[in-house]
Amino acid sequence: MMKVVLATLFLLIHIICIKAGTNFDAKWTRTCSKGYSISRVSSLHSNRHEDRSWSFRCRHNSKITSSCKWSGWVNWFDREILYQCRNGVIAGWHSYHSNRHEDRRFQFKCCRTKKNCVRNCVWTGYVNNWDAYINYGVPRGYFLTGTKSYHHNGHEDRRWRFLICKLG
């Protein structure tokens, strides 16, 4: 019984912390400061809004330059996302929500690395189930360089995978 109480308390603390994240059904942009890249992605799904609130953390690395560029839109509503920064790391997300589609479109900010070299890249498994919490931390020594996601109209949600790489 105590384990259930502690697990519930832990989940509630994480849910409360994510309130500082993005608003449901809203357009938003989150970027890291110069020399930083996204190191943690957290998200809570709301069945009421059929949307997610997102929070991000950033980590500094001297190999990340200030030469950054936003992608175009990487997906259409209800379509798959498959995106990878070229010789860089993800340092920002931009998104807007459609109530008609109950989905989002995304753009990513990529910042170059000093040697323009990423290596030892691996895709994570799916970091969430339908309507479930995301709390993914990029392992030390790796950097977020890509995303893969697909949408399910029945759940009105996305499942996510991330591409992580080491810098050369």
Image (spheres, rainbow, N blue to C red):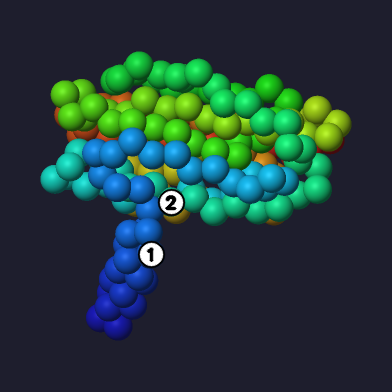
Query: Which structural element holds mark 1?
Result: helix
The quarter of the picture where residue 111 lies is: top right
Kind of residue at badge 1: Cys
Q: CA distance from mark 2 to mark 1?
A: 9 Å
Residue located at (50% from left, 18% from top) = 72
Numbered circle sitting on residue 17:
1
Mark 2 or mark 1: whose residue is earlier in sequence: 1
Q: Quadrant of the C terminus?
A: top right
Q: Residue at image x 63%, y 31%? A: 110
Q: Which residue is mark 2?
A: 55
Q: Is residue 136 left or right of residue 98?
A: right
Quarter containing the N terminus: bottom left
Instruction: Using the image, determine if residue 13 lies above or below residue 56.
Output: below
Give the vertical position of 68 relative to 23 (above or below): above
Instruction: Please indicate whether residue 163 sits to the left or right of residue 45 in the image.
Output: right
As rendered, which of 98 and 160 lies closer to the eye? 98
Residue plotted at (54% across, 53% down): 57
Q: Tell me the element at label 2.
A: strand
Image position, residue 18 (x, y; %): 37, 58
Q: Residue at x 33, y 36 (%)?
A: 27
